[in-house]
Image (cartoon, grey):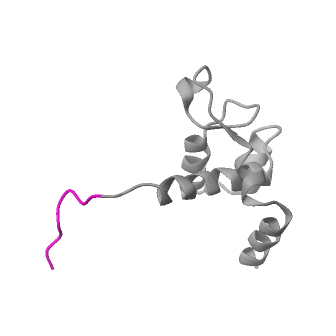
Amino acid sequence: MRRQRVEELCETMTNQELLERITINPKVLAGKPVIRRTRLSVEYILNLLASGATFTEIIAEYEGITTEDIQACLLFASKSLSDTTFMPLQVESA
């Protein structure tokens, strides 16, 4: 059921429209990516989600934040990671 909801959101907004919700301004939070017209960083929202907060809880706690804003944070993080090269610091032995 949750996958269906995510797919419905993806149909309503393009990736570009979602990414436009994230802004970077050197004068706001030292240039960290934030949700447009807020001081809520992408990193902060991701930490809330990683700590177990739901979309509904975040929206209730922070006035003006929408489901699409949170989805934009996830997409931004995903795009950022896809553009990053990872080098292992140590090779694990089996």
Q: Is residue 51 visible?
A: no
| Residue 41 shows up from this direction | yes
Image-based side of 60 in relation to 41, left or right: right
| Quadrant of the rendering where the C terminus is positioned | bottom left
Quadrant where the N terminus sits is bottom right
Residue 10, x across and y down, in percent: 77, 67
In this picture, residue 50 sits left or right of residue 94: right
Residue found 54% across the figure and 48% down from its top = 47
Extreme-right residue of the structure: 12
In this picture, is 89 found above or below 31?
A: below
Q: Position of residue 11 (x, y in %)?
A: 82, 69
Residue under the point 60% across and 37% down: 33
Residue at x 17% of width, y 70% of height: 92
Left or right: where 18 falls relative to 45 = right
- Main SS class of the magenta portion in the image: loop
User: Toward which corner of the image does residue 85 lie, by quadrant?
Assistant: bottom left
Q: Quadrant of residue 89?
A: bottom left
Q: Which residues are magenta?
A: 87-94
Q: Nearer the viewer, residue 93 or 78?
A: 78
x and y, in percent, of residue 83 in the image: 47, 56
Q: Residue at x 72, y 76 (%)?
A: 3
